[in-house]
Structure formats: C-alpha cells, structure tokens
Amino acid sequence: MANIYTPRQQRILLITSLIVIAGFIIYGLRHYATAFLGAAILFVVFRPWFHKLTTEKQWNKRLVTVLLMLFSLIVIIMPFAVLSGLLVDRIQEYARNPNQILDLVKQLEKATGFKITTEQNIRQMVTQGASFASRQVPLILVGTLDFIVILGLLYFALYFMFMEEKAFMKGLQRYLPFDQKTLNELGESLKNNTNANVLGQALVSLVQAILTGVTLWIFGTPDPAFWGMIAFFMAFIPILGTPLVWGPAALIKFSQGATGEGLGILLVGVIVIINIDNLLRIMLAKKMGDVHPLITLTGIVLGVPIFGILGLVVGPLLLSYFIVLMHVFERQNRPQRVEIAADETPIKERATEKGINSTGQAND
C-alpha cells in the first residue's frame, strides 16, 4: 500500500518528531543539566592529560579514566562544594544573628557619612540574602538524592566519554554541520575558552581569595576566613570583584579610628591584590586564551539564575561557546558568500552593458 506522504512531507515529519522527542528529553533532564555540562567541561579540561598518559606513557585507558575522575572529585568538585556549603552556613548564621551585620553597617555609615538604610530593612535584606544564597547553591550540597543522581550522571557520562572517546569524537564530527578544518578550529577555540573560564578564572579567584583573607587577618579584621570565601566568589565578577570585600573592610577600620590598619588594607588591595589579578590574567591569556570582561559579566548575569552558584563558571563558558560558534559559522559561510557574489557580478555587468547599449541607441 502506498504511503500517503510525499518524500518531502516525510522528511518534515521526521525532523518534527526528532525535535519534539528531544524537547521532552531536555525537559525531563532539565534539573540535571549541570551534570552533563560538568561532564563536558571536565572532558575538555582533562582530555590532554588522558592522551598524554594513554598514548605517550601507554597507561591502561580504564585506569587513567578512573584516576582522572578521582582527581576531579577530590581536587575540583568536593572543595568547591564544601566551600559553597560553608559559605551558605555562615550566611544563614548571620541571618539568624544579624547584629554583627548591623554593627558593620553602622561603622560604614560613620566612615562615609551616608545613611544607608533602616535597621528593619537591613534585617530583611540579610534574611533575603541567606535565602537567595541557599537557593543558588546546587542541591548536591544538602545531601539529598539529587546529589547522588547529579554526581552519578556526571561521572557516568565522563567515564564513557573517555572510554569511547574515538566513537564519541566521530559522532560529533558526523553530526556537527562543519567541515574538518572548521571542526579543528572549533575544537581548539572551545578548549582555550574552557581552560580560560574554568582553570584560569578559578586559579585567579583562589589566589585573590587567599591574599584577601591573609590581608584581613594581618590587619585584625574579624572573621578573615569567611571574608576570604566571599572574596573567592566575588573574584569571578570582573572589575568589581575583591574590592567589594577589602574596600568596606578598610572603611570600617577608618571609622574605628584604626587609620594605619585601614590604610594598610587599601594599599595591599590596590597595589598587590588588584595587580596580581591583572598579572595572572595576562600570563594565563598567553597559554589559555583571554575572555573579555563583558562576556564574563554577562555570562554571570545569565548563568547564576539558571545554574545557581555554578553559573559563575558555566554562564561565561556557554556565552563564550556561543560566540565561538558564531565566528565558526561566519568563517564557514564566507566562501559561499564569495561564490554568490562572483556569480552575481557577470549578471550585473551584462545588465549594465545592456542599459548602456539601450541608452546609446535611444540617443541615436
């Protein structure tokens, strides 16, 4: 019996079916998107190590994969998770006892001469800030079932990315709409952007956080470890970053009459912490690539509401990927535009000549 659809209608229905099914899959896995994004990020970061150990050193592929997974868990994921959890716990503690925050605000008002807000509003803002911070931290920090599912999906995907690397890369090359040269350029650009956003930014933030915490401890600021944690996350924000931590600390010292300590914090912040940020970014940009501050800031604004605190990393990374794909698309389609322009030129020339001949005949 003949099919009622034409070949063109069959193709349209097939594509529509694929899009609808993919939509259901994405919707069902939307809460676990960070697992697959995390697996992709770790794959890009550790792939050079994987190749070096399995190809040059001839280590067992399964052993290398397991070692890299353990390394990423111990060195990257767990410290970030623990740090985030400690931060939220401390913010919630301040929310339950906001008197310390009220004292800090009063000292800032005394130092600047400006009335910031009322005591009731400050209490409300502290409570809302604690609630906001709790919502932004991924559920893997609170010991629920989502922790096991997200971490399991992440490492399950990462394991098969490494173990089936050749098949995985061939699949990407087959289904991505780019030629081989463009795919090579795309892979290099994505690798540089991943390293710059993940490794580079995390290293810069960690160094700045340590310097900020040590500076505040040297000059007698209460709870320097907590403010160092705040500085770590603030350092992801370009331009503002750690000055949002050590700047108010210096103002509070001035308001307390400790001019020398306040001046010391300012000098270390301006001369050391800010400059070490610029120096590290220049050094890392040569090896990993550079990311414009506007991309980082916009990525954070987009990423945090979607991915929580992980959006500090994932947001700028996704925005960088989008820009890279746009550039790749432009480069791949440039030869086609040149060919179209070359084909149109003789037509225009013939039309122009025809117009000239018509004009000449009319004048005659």
Image (tube, helix red, strand yellow):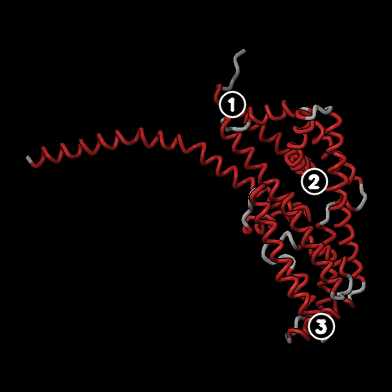
Kind of residue at disc 2: His
302 left or right, relative to 127? left
Tell me if I can see residue 359 in this picture: yes
Residue at the outermost front position: 57
Mark 2 and mark 1 residues within 8 Å of each other at the beta carbon: no
Residue drawn at 93 percent across, 50 percent down: 143
Which residue extends farthest left?
Answer: 364
CB within 8 Å, label 3 to label 1: no
Location of mark 3 (residue): 107
Q: Which residue is mark 2?
A: 31
Measure the alpha-carbon separation of dots 3 and 1: 69 Å
Residue 13 screen position, x and y as percent: 62, 29
Q: Is residue 290 left or right of residue 165?
A: left
Disc 1 residue type?
Answer: Arg
Q: Nearer the viewer, residue 258 or 28?
A: 258
Query: x, y percentage for residue 147?
Result: 88, 46
27 or 152, which is in the foreground?
152
Q: Which residue is mark 1?
A: 11
190 lies left or right of 45: left
User: Which residue shows up at 59% across the image and 47% down it?
Assistant: 323
Classify 320 as above or below 234: above
What is the secondary structure assignment of the residue under circle 2? helix
Please tell me whether mark 1 sits on a helix, a strand or a loop.
helix
Disc nearer the start of the sequence (3/1): 1
Q: Position of residue 3 (x, y in %)?
A: 60, 18
Percent position (x, y) of residue 318? 67, 48
Q: Residues within 10 Å of mark 3 (few under 14, many from 20)?
A: many
Disc with the residue nearer the chain's start (2 vs 1): 1
